[in-house]
Amino acid sequence: MRVLLGITGASGSILCITLIKILKELEIDVLLTATKNGIKVCEFETNIKINDFVKSNSIQYYDIDDLFSPPSSGTFKLDAVVVIPCSMGTLSRIAQGTSSNLLERSADVALKEKKKLILSPRETPINSIHLENMLKLSRMGVVIIPPSIAFYTKPKTVDDIINFQVGKILDQLGVDHTLFNRWDSLS
């Protein structure tokens, strides 16, 4: 499996960092791109320098402005695109079919090639424009997974909350995991 992950300027970069670590542990091919603000927010929230993280984890990184890179083509073998966290600006441009950078183009390619596209929008409160854009994308088959706390799992740490969110994305990718207790194992 080959997955392109995208980080935008919304809060929640630790979700993508955690997802990358787990996918790499499972020997899944991970590619990464990030908006300029995504890099800034990630470094601010996590103290992780994207360049160092990419090198230390052997991740193929593509510059956000490189529309000649492989993920911008429908002929490139890619199983899924995951945007986590996904700003509402990026979500809106994906919903409108605007491809002004590699992440938006890769999402557009996933849609046209009928590949899995997962967006994890991070905004609150959500306004009517956000809802309409999410509905439009959902009707196109996009999986929308906003960060949500599952209180029934009785999270005790921030890592428990992060693992639940990442686990829900892994579920959508069809990847087995044990990041959280399933409902049938809670009783």
Image: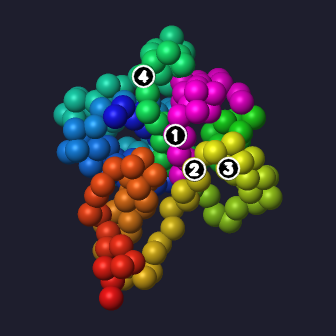
Query: Which residue is pictured at 32% across the width and 25% down the height?
Result: 60
Which region is colored magenta? 97-120
Q: Tell whether position 98 is magenta.
A: yes
Sequence-earlier tag: 1 or 4: 4
Query: Which residue is pictured at 63% across the width and 39% down the height?
Result: 90
Q: Which residue is mark 3?
A: 138
For label 4, the SS is loop
- 163 in relation to 22, above or below: below
Sequence-earlier tag: 3 or 4: 4
- 66 in relation to 27, above or below: above
For label 1, the SS is strand
Q: Which residue is mark 1?
A: 116
Q: Nearer the viewer, residue 126 or 154?
A: 154
Q: Quadrant of the C terminus?
A: bottom left
Sequence-earlier tag: 2 or 4: 4
Q: Is residue 138 left or right of residue 25?
A: right
The kind of residue on which mark 4 rests is Lys
Few, some or many C-alpha atoms within 10 Å of disc 3 (few <14, some 14-19, many ≥20)? some
Circles 2 and 1, Cβ within 8 Å, touching? The answer is yes
Q: Which residue is mark 2?
A: 143
* Residue 180 x, y percent position in the rendering: 32, 69
Is residue 59 among the parts visible in the rendering? yes
Q: Which residue is mark 4?
A: 77
Sequence-earlier tag: 1 or 3: 1
- 153 in relation to 20, above or below: below
Q: Tell whether position 43 is magenta.
A: no
Extreme-top residue of the structure: 68
The kind of residue on which mark 1 rests is Lys
Few, some or many C-alpha atoms within 10 Å of disc 2 (few <14, some 14-19, many ≥20)? some
How many dots with numbers?
4
